[in-house]
Image (spheres, rainbow, N blue to C red):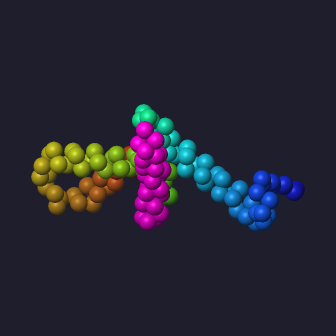
Amino acid sequence: MRKGFFSTDCSMSAKEVIDIYRSRFQIEFLFRDAKQFTGLCHCQARDTRALDFAFNLSLAAINVAKAFCRHYNLNFSIADLKLLMHNAMMIERFLSMFGNLPNVHKNQGLKEHYFKDLLLYGLKVSA
């Protein structure tokens, strides 16, 4: 099966056109994730500098999240990573509100199991 790829820039080689077309879906996923998870479309500013800042911050947050997953070898979606960070924040909040927990050294393996279950609660991909 043959496919035809076209470009309005006549100076581009066929390889350049195909490379740009392949990156198209990565760009679309970036914008989809930014709209769904980092508020790309929620800025209500009217000033162009404020809008530029909000758009850049939203897109940068997606890139930082993807770099975080890549750095820690996690195969998470942005939704899973957002939920993981939420769970970690809630666990930290609960532990700080309870203060020093009694019997910290007893049943250490069991506590680690429960901690991991709480941390990964609701994720579609399990680590």
Magenta stretch contains residue 69: yes
The residue located at (46%, 46%) in the rendering is 52
Residue 55, above or below 63: above
State the residue in front, 4 or 118: 4
In the foreground, 53 or 6: 53
Residue at the spot 40% in from the left edge and 46% down from the top edge: 83
Looking at the image, residue 44 sits to the left or right of residue 26; the answer is left
Q: Is residue 77 above or below residue 73?
A: above
- Judge whether 41 appears above or below 104 on screen: above
Q: Is residue 57 a member of the stretch shown in magenta?
A: yes
Q: How many marks?
A: 0
- Examine the image and state in which quarter residue 68 appears: bottom left
Seen at 49% across and 37% down, the residue is 41
Quarter of the figure with the C terminus: bottom left
Quarter of the image with the N terminus is bottom right
Does residue 127 show up?
no
What is the magenta range? 47-73
Where's residue 54, x and y in %? 43, 44
Q: Give how far across and how far down residue 26 sits, in percent.
A: 61, 54
Q: Is residue 87 left or right of residue 32?
A: left
Q: Main secondary structure of the magenta part?
A: helix
The image shows residue 105 at horizontal and vertical percentages of 17, 61
Q: Percent position (x, y) of residue 43?
A: 43, 37
- The answer to whether any part of residue 32 appears in the image is yes
Q: Is residue 18 left or right of residue 1?
A: left
The relative height of residue 16 versus residue 28 in the rendered view (above or below) is below
Pick the residue in front: 14 or 123.
14
Q: Residue at x 14, y 52 (%)?
A: 101
